[in-house]
Image: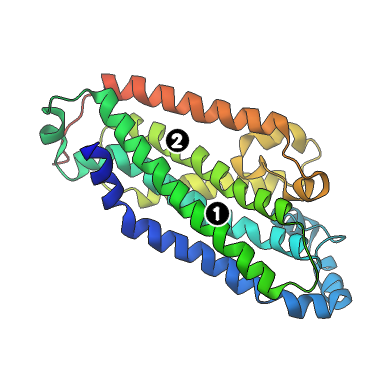
Amino acid sequence: MNMYLYELKSQIKSAITWTLVMIALATIYLVMYPGVASDANAFKDLISNYPPTIRAMLGINIDTITSLLGFYSMIFSFITLAGAIQAMNLGLSILSKESRERTADFLLVKPVSRSAIVTAKLSSAITTILETNIAFCVLTPIIANLVKIENFDLKVFTMINLTLFFIQIIFLTIGMIVSVFFQKIKTIIPISLGIVFGFYFIGAFLATANDDVVKRVLSPFKYFDITYIITNKNYELPYLILSAVIVLTSIIATFILYNKKDIHAVS
């Protein structure tokens, strides 16, 4: 419990910063919505001139773009990108920082198993992600209600927001499994940005692929189709299952590899 609380405390500043960044992104774009809705036809004409690749990458549906949910779906890709970076940073750092900060020897000689260490650190990271998403899911509907032109489906709005949590958990666990493969990680930023933007651009490239139903598995950013959620008020079950498999596999592999890993302080 002490380790869990210590890790949670050490993540507070970063969590607050990322939470404010994502809420600020949502606010900046949502306050533009009344202007967009007031001149809907002109905005549709403008969006129609975007290349199909850009529209697909941003998840833009011309038919719904001037509704609040449709407009929100366009900006949400930037929010999930920020959330993925936060989660990847967290996943890469929670197990590797002991070597980076030269506290590995101090931690590992304590009467606590490596599995308990992973459990405490993983629990603190998930708690941090939960806190971020609770704040985001509470505040963004309030902002949306302040700028709305007509009523919108709050359930669908919440379902869209929840995809941020799902994507963050995927990237958190991917970050953890990546961190245990490296013997020494001196800085996490290049690795984190490389992985997140790599998946993001893979998703952008595949957005216009003819067989994207198959290729979507290559990018977690494409597991949750916002247009599908708006239309069907549901998630796509195969991609929910795939997400759960990735998360569980990454967690199990992290426990196994961390228990076998030779851990050294960075010289």
Instruction: Specify few, some or many for label 2: CA neighbours under 10 Å numbering under 14, 14-19, or 20 or more.
Output: many
Which badge, 2 or 1, comes first in the chain's sequence?
1
Residue 27 in the image: above or below residue 251: below
Q: Quadrant of residue 217?
A: top right
Q: Quadrant of residue 141?
A: bottom right
Residue found at x 30% / y 25%: 258
User: Which element type, helix, strand or loop, lies under badge 1?
Assistant: helix
Amino acid at circle 1: Leu
| Residue that badge 2 annotates | 173
Residue 147 in the image: above or below residue 155: below
The reply, left or right, for residue 103 in relation to residue 191 is left
Amino acid at circle 2: Thr
Q: Quadrant where the C terminus lies? A: top left
Rounded to the nearest whole Å, what is the CA distance between mark 2 and mark 1? 16 Å
Residue 226 position, x and y percent, is: 72, 50
Q: Quadrant of residue 68?
A: bottom right
Residue found at x 41% / y 22%: 253
Residue 194 in view in this figure: yes
Residue found at x 42% / y 22%: 252
Image mark for residue 81: 1
In depth, the one of 92 and 18 nearer the eye is 18
Question: Which colour scheme appears in the figure?
Answer: rainbow
User: Which element type, helix, strand or loop, lies under badge 2?
Assistant: helix
Residue 159 position, x and y percent, is: 67, 48
